[in-house]
Each structure stands twice: as structure tokens, then as C-alpha cells.
Amino acid sequence: MPDSRKEHRRSAAASKENALDMQAIEGHVGYLLRRTQLLVFEDVIRALEPHGLRPATYSALVVIDANPGRSQREIASALGIQRPNFVAMMDEFETRGLAERLPSPTDRRSHALKLTERGTALLAEANKSVRAHEKRMAQKFTPEGINTLKAILRGK
Amino acid sequence: MPDSRKEHRRSAAASKENALDMQAIEGHVGYLLRRTQLLVFEDVIRALEPHGLRPATYSALVVIDANPGRSQREIASALGIQRPNFVAMMDEFETRGLAERLPSPTDRRSHALKLTERGTALLAEANKSVRAHEKRMAQKFTPEGINTLKAILRGK
């Protein structure tokens, strides 16, 4: 057997021997969710980077696009984002010309949010990258796994 | 019908009418994971607070306890924590008398980590609160949902 293969076997055995006992923590659903979420986010962060977006800003564009005319309060609350953080995000969108705050037709104290043409175009491009990311992830998640997450999120 | 019930019906109808369309974003597994993880963390953060622990510090105590004598590098890497963040965590543990860095018998440049008696006792108490948290969560997660998370985490 060549030395390099012997070396490989030896180090594989050593790394198995040195593996930590993670059973006690892997039984915890919060730990599993957090580590899995970080793994999935690593992939989507890479997918969104070329579009100048992060998971949070991408989600916000998706939800504004699907709900034009809604207020900052409504969009922030649906996304579970703190109001001041969402206002900062809208500032970023306006600076980049991706979304705008229009006067609300029903409430003088709030704005109606809407994507600009540039925002719609950027979202369409980002959606392509995210669809490729989802395809990679779909190989890892079972439909039951996805359904569990959806049920929990809807409070069932 | 009493006014308060009429009022209730009206506002329930209004809130349904005002519900945002979240379908486009709820189809994304990263979004589902992140929102679910935040929900579960809200519960475990409350469970750990009386013990002066956070999810990250609790996980570290569990893994040090299950793997006494391992190095900072090994524990940090198994938990997916950046090395400097883990060193700061160990500083916190030493200040509180929960864990200690002993001289490593095999490597002069590294330490062997170990829980103190106080750390073991605190972990036992925290485990009780976490078991109650896990019971609350078990009603929400299907075994298939849990298995999906485990399989992904193990890279399968």
C-alpha cells in the first residue's frame, strides 16, 4: 500500500477516534434548527450576494412585491422585523432606487410601500438565483420536514 | 348579539381581510427555518434565563460535560463557534467558576477543558428547565421533521 494511502487511513481512523460526543446536544430541537438554519443561510447568502441582497432584504422585497400599498408597520410585523430595523432597510431601498414610500391613500400618518421598476427587475434576477438555491436544498429536506416547519410557523 | 361580540367578529374579519400574502416567502426553506428557529429560541431563552445561561453557553456546557479533557479548538469547532468567541465564553465560565482550563497532558500549547462541580450542578438544573422546554416543543415537531434536521446537519 503506498504511504499516502496508509497515511490517509491512519488519519481517517484518528479523526473518527477524536470525534466528539455530540449526542447530548443534538437531541435538542433548538440546536438542530439553529445549525441547520446556518447551513441553509450560508448557501442563500452566497446566492444573494451578487445581487447586493441579504436574506432579510430579499425577504422584504418579496413581501413588498406581493403586497403593494401596505404600510411599513404591516410589512415589518409580517416579517417579524423590529420597526426601526425595517425603516433603516427602507432607507437603503430608497437610496438604491429599489422601493419607494408613497403617500397612503387611507392614512395620512403612514406610507404605502411599493417596488420601483428597478426593484422589480432586481427581484426577478435574485429569484432566479434563489430558485437554484432552493433546488440544492430540496435534495436535503423531506416534504414532511418542510410541512413541520410550516405548521409550527402557523402556530399549529 | 352583544356589542363586544359584534366588535370581535368585525375585527376578526378586518384582520383576515388585512392579512398579508406571505405565500411567496413561506415557500423558501431558509425563511421557514429562520422564523421557526426564532420561535423555538424565544422559548428556550426564557427557560435558560433563570440559570444565567443563553442557548450558546448552555450548548457549550453540555458539550464540555460530555467531552471532558478536550481542547478549546475541538469544542469550538464541534459547536461551529468562532475560536475567539469561544475563548470569551470560556473566560465567562472561569469567572463564574463553571468550567476550567487545565494543562493538557498531550499538548503543551492547548488546554484540557472540564466543568467544575458548580458547573456540573448548574447544568443539571438547566437541563431540567430545558427538558420542560423540549416537552413543549415536542408537541409541535413531528419525528419526520426532527429527522430531516438531523440528516441535514450530518450532511446526508
Image (cartoon, coloured by chain):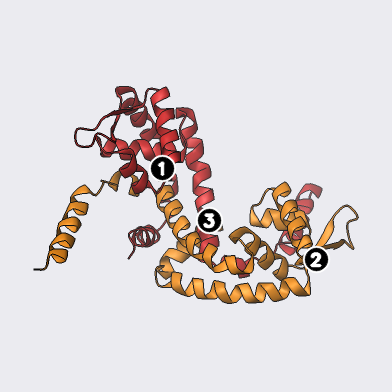
Chain colours: A red, B orange
The residue carrying mark 2 is B69
Packing grade of label 3 (10 A; few <14, some 14-19, many >=20) is many
Q: Position of residue B67 (x, y in %)?
A: 73, 67
Chain bearing tag 2 is B
- Tell me how far mark 1 sits from mark 2, CA to CA: 46 Å
- In the structure shown, which secondary structural element does the residue marked by tag 1 occupy? helix
Q: Is residue B5 above or below residue B121?
A: above
Lower sequence index among marks 3 and 1: 3
Q: Nearer the viewer, mark 3 or mark 1?
A: 1
In this view, the residue in front, A144 or B73, is: B73
The residue carrying mark 1 is A83
Question: In the picture, residue B103 is in which quadrant?
Answer: bottom right
Determine the residue positioned at 45% across, 34% down: A88
Q: Is residue A82 above or below residue B41?
A: above
3 and 2 marks in contact (CB < 8 Å): no
Viewer can see residue A17: yes
Q: Position of residue A129 (x, y in %)?
A: 41, 35
Determine the residue positioned at 54% across, 57% down: B153
- Tell me how far mark 3 sits from mark 1, CA to CA: 24 Å
Q: Position of residue B105 (x, y in %)?
A: 90, 63
Kind of residue sitting beneath label 3: Arg
Chain bearing tag 1 is A
Kind of residue sitting beneath label 1: Arg
In this view, the residue in front, B1 or A3, is: B1
Kind of residue sitting beneath label 2: Gly
Question: In the picture, residue A23 is in which quadrant?
Answer: bottom right
